[in-house]
Amino acid sequence: MTDLIDLTAERNKRAAPDPEFVRRDGFGRPMYVFLLSYEMGGSSWCTEVWAYDIADAENRVAGMRGSLKVDGQLFERAPA
């Protein structure tokens, strides 16, 4: 006898982001990586932002438009 496979559950698992693209904030709420793109010097560039959902990502981009600045160059990350 074979085991039954719940196709809806399998589809939902595959539709979820890989674990490295999900983290939890200090209150346990999930955050996800969203890709951002922009044009500069005739080329397309991209970066990423962590946000709770697409609306939050769009709000973060709106905030960046008014206040984004360069704080310095990152040389390394200390292990946690």
Image (tube, grey):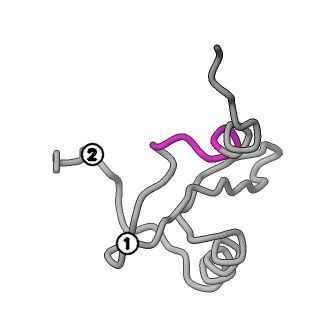
Q: Quadrant of the N terminus?
A: top right
Q: Position of residue 66 (x, y in %)?
A: 63, 85
Q: Position of residue 40 (x, y in %)?
A: 75, 53
| Residue 42, label in figure | none
Q: Nearer the viewer, mark 1 or mark 2?
A: 1
For the point 54% across and 40% down, the residue is 18
Q: Nearer the viewer, residue 33 or 66?
A: 33
For the point 71% across and 69% down, the residue is 54
Q: Where on the picture, by quarter, is residue 13?
A: top right
Q: Position of residue 74 (x, y in %)?
A: 32, 51
Q: Few, some or many C-alpha atoms within 10 Å of disc 2 (few <14, some 14-19, many ≥20)? A: few
Q: Nearer the viewer, residue 25 or 13?
A: 13
Q: Are marks 1 and 2 in contact (CB under 8 Å)?
A: no
For the point 55% across and 61% down, the residue is 49
Q: Is residue 18 magenta?
A: yes
Q: Nearer the viewer, residue 73 or 78?
A: 78
Amino acid type of the residue that numbered disc 1 sits on in the rendered structure: Gly
Q: Residue furthest top?
A: 1
Residue of label 1: 28
Would residue 44 appear left or right of 21 to someone viewing this image?
A: right
Q: Where on the picture, by quarter, is residue 8?
A: top right
Q: Secondary structure at mark 2?
A: loop
For the point 74% across and 39% down, the residue is 11
**Which label's residue is closer to the chain start, 1 or 2?**
1
Would residue 6 appear left or right of 60 to someone viewing this image?
A: right
Cα–Cα span, label 1 and label 2: 30 Å
Q: Position of residue 39 (x, y in %)?
A: 78, 53
Would residue 32 appear left or right of 77 to someone viewing this image?
A: right
**What is the magenta range?**
13-19
Amino acid type of the residue that numbered disc 2 sits on in the rendered structure: Phe
Q: Few, some or many C-alpha atoms within 10 Å of disc 1 (few <14, some 14-19, many ≥20)? A: few
| Residue 75, label in figure | 2
